[in-house]
Image (spheres, rainbow, N blue to C red):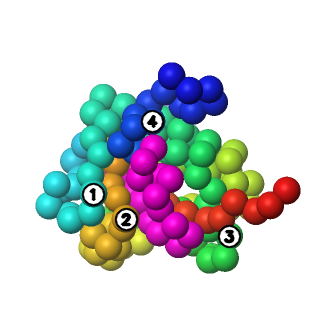
């Protein structure tokens, strides 16, 4: 055990978060997402919600403040303006860790394409539909 590291972040995911560079992207996806076929490195966190994983990841990883959209969810098919409750939770978590950031969204197939190019994917046990978020890693600024 280590101090101040959320215990749901195991060694594989911690290694990925550490190895990622500025601008690299990581996806946190729900249990329905076709993650095995996507291509990037895959870490499975079955039984853990996407919101819990997002909170743990953002406790360690800064978001990219050089871009307009550093936290992106998948749009609801057929109704791009609709917000599922899990999306509101994602946005609240993002803003708790990065108060200046907002949650953006992408059309379903554009989201899939972008995740396929990500550094890694974390597949959770999230059962709520649209429980998917893509994060762009930022930099740690000197004090």
Disc 1 element:
strand
* Residue at screen point 39% across, 57% down: 27
- Image quadrant where residue 93 sits: top right
Contact, CB < 8 Å: mark 2 with mark 4?
A: no
Residue 80: where, in percent of width, then height? 41, 69
Q: Secondary structure at mark 3?
A: loop
Q: CA distance from mark 2 to mark 3?
A: 18 Å
Of 58 and 5, which appears nearest the observer?
Answer: 5
* Discs 3, 1 touching: Cβ within 8 Å: no
Where residue 137 is drawn, which disc sits there?
none
The CA distance from mark 3 to mark 1 is: 25 Å
Residue hosting label 2: 119
Looking at the rendered image, the disc whose residue lies closer to the viewer, 3 or 1, is: 1
The answer to which image quadrant residue 125 occupies is: top left
Residue 141, percent from left and from top: 76, 62
Reading the image, the residue beneath label 3 is 65
What residue would you read off at disc 4?
A: 9
- Give whichever of discs 1 and 4 has the lower sequence position: 4
Q: Residue at x 33, y 55 (%)?
A: 121
Residues in magenta?
A: 14-29
Q: Earlier in the sequence, mark 1 or mark 2?
A: 1
Residue placed most toward the observer, 82 or 91: 91
Q: Position of residue 71 (x, y in %)?
A: 53, 62
Q: Quadrant of the C terminus?
A: bottom right
- Report whether residue 112 is seen: no
Under tag 2, what secondary structure?
loop
Which residue corresponds to mark 1? 41
């Amino acid at each position: 055990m280590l101090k101040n590291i959320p215990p749901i972040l195991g060694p594989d995911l911690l290694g990925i978060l550490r190895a990622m560079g500025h601008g690299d992207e990581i996806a946190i996806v729900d249990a329905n997402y076709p993650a095995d076929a996507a291509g990037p490195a895959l870490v499975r966190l079955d039984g853990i919600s996407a919101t819990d994983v997002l909170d743990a990841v953002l406790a360690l990883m800064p978001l990219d403040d050089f871009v307009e959209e550093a936290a992106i969810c998948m749009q609801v098919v057929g109704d791009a303006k609709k917000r599922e409750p899990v999306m509101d939770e994602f946005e609240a978590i993002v803003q708790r860790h990065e108060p200046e950031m907002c949650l953006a969204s992408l059309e379903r197939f554009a989201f899939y394409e972008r995740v396929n190019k990500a550094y890694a994917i974390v597949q959770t046990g999230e059962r709520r539909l649209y429980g998917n978020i893509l994060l762009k890693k930022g930099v740690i600024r000197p004090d």
